[in-house]
Amino acid sequence: MSFPSARLVESQKIGYTCTMNLPQEKVQFAVGEHVVYPLQGVGVIKRIEERTFRGAVTMYYVIYLDISDMTVMIPVEKSKEMGIRPIVEQKEAQAAIDSISSKYEPMPVDWKARYQMNVDLLKQGSIASISKVVQALYHRSKIKELPVQERKLYDNALRLLIDETSFSLKKDKKEIELLVFSRLEK
């Protein structure tokens, strides 16, 4: 697959001028800005490009996801629909961590129903829903070993929570991991 034309759009937010005529309301994020890609983690916008694909010109965010060492291209117009969002404020990140130690609400015994509920929560993409999944699966694992799919889901949710809160709270990932586990044990 080739993209015959590409123009780099430089962000006005970091001191550059825009190199094309594009309505500013469409471009929500700037080059160099950290964003959250649901189910994938925190990434940084490396470029904003205009590309021609099948005769249509489309703007793309080029996002590098450090945690998986992967670069993705997300159409600017579909970024909101895909759940791309800014890193949460410190207050919201702290609230998500604090909520982990709140009263645990038991989930369905059937692992398939539980799994689907947790996948749906993760797809919401909010840090609060991610922390609910971490809390629920952690407590469930203390009762009975998690099936492989749920274990992977738990590991992914934990990674997403630690990744975003470390950026938001400007703390090391190891420090956030210790904080999360200390709250889970309460």
Image: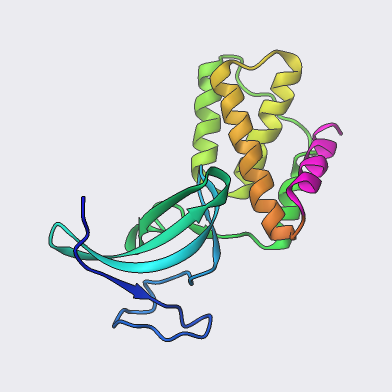
Is 124 or 177 nearer to us in this picture? 177
Please identify the dominant SS of the magenta region. Answer: helix
Q: Is residue 84 visible?
A: yes
- In the rendered view, would you say 180 is above or below 55? above
Q: Residue at x 51, y 42 (%)?
A: 39
Where are the magenta residues, as a range? 172-186
Q: Is residue 33 left or right of residue 161?
A: left
Q: Residue at x 56, y 14 (%)?
A: 110
Q: Is residue 98 visible?
A: no
Q: Residue furthest left?
A: 55
- In the rendered view, would you say 133 is above or below 57? above
Task: Point out the image quarter for the C terminus.
Answer: top right
Q: Residue at x 65, y 48 (%)?
A: 163
Where in the figure is residue 144, as x and y percent of width and height? 70, 13
Q: How many numbered markers are drawn?
A: 0
Where in the figure is residue 105, as x and y percent of width and height? 71, 29
Is 140 or 106 nearer to us in this picture? 140
Q: Is residue 174 magenta?
A: yes
Q: Is residue 43 left or right of residue 10?
A: right
Q: Is residue 4 left or right of residue 70?
A: left
Image colouring: rainbow
Q: Is residue 128 magenta?
A: no
